[in-house]
Image (tube, coloured by chain):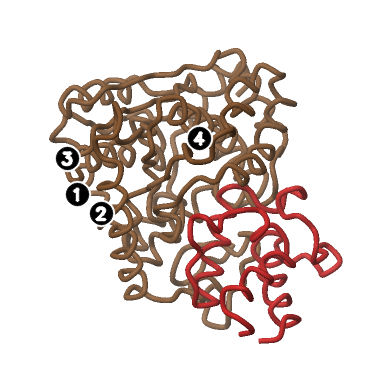
Amino acid sequence: MNLCARCILPDTFPGIKLDDEGICNHCRGFKGIEVLQAHKKEYEGKFLDLVERFRGKGAYDCLVAFSGGKDSTYTLQVLRERYNLRVLALTIDNGFISERAFRNMCSVTDNLGVDHMIFKPRFDLMKQIFRKAAEEDIYSKKTLERASTICTSCIGIVKSVTLKTALEKNIMLIGYGWSPGQAPVQSAVIRTNPALIKATQAAIQGPLSKAGGDEVNSYFLTDAHFADADRFPYNVHPLAFLDYNEENIIKEIGRYGWQMPDDTDSNSTNCLLNAFANEVHIKRFQFHPYVWEIANMVREGVMNRDDGYKKIYGAQSPELLKVAQERLGLGS
Amino acid sequence: MEQAALKTQIRQYILDNFLFGGSDADLADNDSFLDKGIIDSTGVLELVAFVEENFDMKVQDEDLIPENLDSVDNLAAFIESRNGRI
């Protein structure tokens, strides 16, 4: 396996082309840090306008999808303190959140002074979905580029329940802790569109209901939710337009009691299923499901190549796989 | 840019980034990206980035509708309407 000499994407990654210097087409197409910085400024400005528009209009200014991991924790903190928003933190418990991550959530929400809701879908249903996702690829090829099938299943439910909650509580801003590598800065502040949501919802809801049965439909939007387009909120992921440094983030959220879990893999700070999900993906496709995100961060200069390399190609503990396999009722 | 060239550029982007090097036979100009499962909600965001970076235009929030984004034909018409004939 050859890696891009700049960003660590492997030659097994879909659509990649390495040139004579071993540099990939994504690196060659990158517009540069200065263009990126200009975008960052632009999108923070857009967000500040929205903050002024919606602050103080309802019970909460912003709903934050809060996994307990470092990025969503830092997002929660930034939205609460830097932008002075009244925040509701929402956690979707997929049945695999680490004990340390739960303790982190309590410490952080207590110390930040934010309300916190936890929604836990039935574990038998989640287990059925995850087992199916481990066996076969039930979404489009493109989804595999940025996440495992297991993760896509989980995040599909997270995003839908989060949007439903924002609509039902009339909250006009939803904060996500996507890292700079997970979504382009051009999507950092974007209004959800009912027609588009309706169309894209089908791509997740269909496979999930095949995997888990009709019960999953309760996690998705109904016609009643789509009735009033003006209530559809804006999604914001501020880590795309703020300076991102993993070490600084961990130090910063440490002030609110957050501690690094010791029972998760190198690409998660909250989920006990992640290592198994990655392993399934690597065996099937010969590339790591996090490599796109990490390569983007290396390319954009927010992570150095060595650290990126260790996250993706460093050895992982086999114990991490066993925990998930046992909970899913799968042989190791 | 003539419309034919515009559609070719869009099609190539979709083939390279969503269908991973598939051929022209895999994608008709009026194929719905969403119905065919070619793009999902995150893919829409990447499409927005592609349009903004390559055609020197801003995609506003109200532009994020299937009529503008959901096929090679729709996307070409949307880009042209913003830029005039490029």
Compared with residue A36, is residue A100 higher up or lower down, i.e. above or below?
Answer: above
Colour of the chain lettered B: red
Quickly name the residue at label 3: A81
Kindly identify which chain the residue marked by label 1 belongs to.
A
Please report the residue visible at 42 percent of the width from the left and 45 percent of the height from the top. Answer: A234
Are the residues under badges 1 and 2 in a single subunit?
Answer: yes
Mark 1 residue crowding within 10 angstroms, few (<14) / some (14–19) / many (20+): few
CA–CA distance in space, label 3 to label 2: 18 Å
Chain containing mark 2: A
- Residue type marked 3: Glu
Circle 1 sits on which residue?
A248
Q: CA distance from mark 1 to mark 2?
A: 5 Å
Amino acid residing under circle 4: Lys
Mark 4 and mark 1 on one chain: yes
Q: Earlier in the sequence, mark 3 or mark 2?
A: 3
CB under 8 Å between callouts 1 and 2? yes
Determine crowd level at label 4: few under 14, some 14-19, many 20+ residues with C-alpha closer than 10 A: some
The residue that label 4 is drawn on is A159
Hue used for the chain lettered A: brown
Nearest the camera: A85 or A38?
A85
